[in-house]
Image: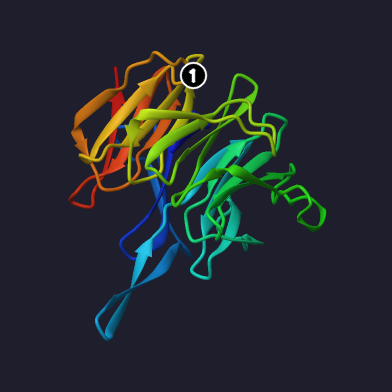
Amino acid sequence: MISWHDQLQLAWTGSDLRINLASTPDGSQVTARQRLDQRSFKQVTTRTGDSSSTRRVALAPSLAASGDRLYLAWTGSNAALNLLAAEAPAQAPLTLRERSGHSPSLAPSGDGGLVLAWTGTDRHVNLLPLDQGPYPAPGAAGAAKSTLEQARTADPPAVCFHRGNLVLAWTGTDHCVNIAAGVTPPAVRPARLDGARTLHAPALCSHQGGLVLAWTGTDHRVNILTGAEEPLSTPVRLDEARTRHAPALCSYQDSLFVAWCGTDGRLNLARLP
């Protein structure tokens, strides 16, 4: 979920595993929606005794705006990372050689380009700068990719651009959220938030000069921490926002918006005061 061209833009993977795009001017009414041919999911095999079963699990896409363009990133069914200029969804996507079993995270880099973040097959967070253009290209031979040895997670990372710096958040293997501001790969100095425990990925956004962090608590309620860069900030638990997935955040029209998939499988969007 991001703000682009005076609209709130949303992307999600539907129950048919196809990626959807929608826009709304005020968060209350969808004015445009399209379902893409692209699908995002992974195969999960469950073994019980001598038998096993395989099911498809949907993976969330990611949106980012850079310059005057809107970009969409997702993990394909073959675990390859993909990038698409979202305003021209009929064109073929750019498929990267990078692979992940999780959703990627996409953010503007501040210099007109993009930054792609994902959890590798070794559970380390990776960052890849992408050049400007309708189909931004990675550095030659993948030389620009950085693997962050201090950022290890079993979930997708979250990345955003705040006050001229790249900020990264992830859920550690101990289920505590970690946040690192001013990321300059490969140097990362994370702060571990002991009070932020989750079984899912966190969400990040820059809002009115402050950094906002969101996560789904172990009680399945969404938590919001404003001023996340300040160690004494206190999170707010949204009792009405219950989910078994990660939330999404966006700053739009001087308000903070949060989106989540309810326990009934339906999308929810709320403007916070």
Q: Quadrant of the C terminus?
A: top left
Q: Is residue 128 left or right of residue 191?
A: right
The residue lying toward the viewer, choosing from 108 and 237, is 237
Q: Position of residue 69 (x, y in %)?
A: 62, 40
Inspect this view and state whether residue 220 appears.
yes
Q: Is residue 43 left or right of residue 99?
A: left
The quarter of the displayed image where residue 171 is located:
top left
Query: Which residue does the image show at 25% across and 40% down from the upper left?
Result: 218
Q: How many marks?
A: 1
Note whether 253 is above or below 120 in the view shown.
above
Note whether 196 is above or below 106 in the view shown.
above
Query: Which residue does the image show at 33% across and 26% down from the upper left?
Result: 224
Q: Position of residue 213 (x, y in %)?
A: 41, 28
Q: Is residue 18 left or right of residue 98?
A: left
The quarter of the displayed image where residue 106 is located:
top right
The residue lying toward the viewer, choosing from 73 and 212, is 212
Identity, as a three-letter code, of the amino acid under mark 1: Glu
Q: Position of residue 15 (x, y in %)?
A: 30, 62
Note whether 195 is above or below 118 in the view shown.
above
Q: Furthest residue to the right?
A: 140
Q: Position of residue 5 (x, y in %)?
A: 53, 31
Inspect this view and state whether residue 67 appears.
no
Q: Which residue is mark 1?
A: 229
Q: Quadrant of the N terminus?
A: top left
The residue lying toward the viewer, choosing from 107 and 122, is 122
Query: Which residue does the image show at 39% across and 49% down from the upper left?
Result: 33
* Structural crowding at the residue carrying mark 1, measured as other residues with C-alpha within 10 Å and reported as few (<14), some (14–19) or many (≥20): some
Query: Which residue does the image show at 64% across and 41% down from the upper left?
Result: 115
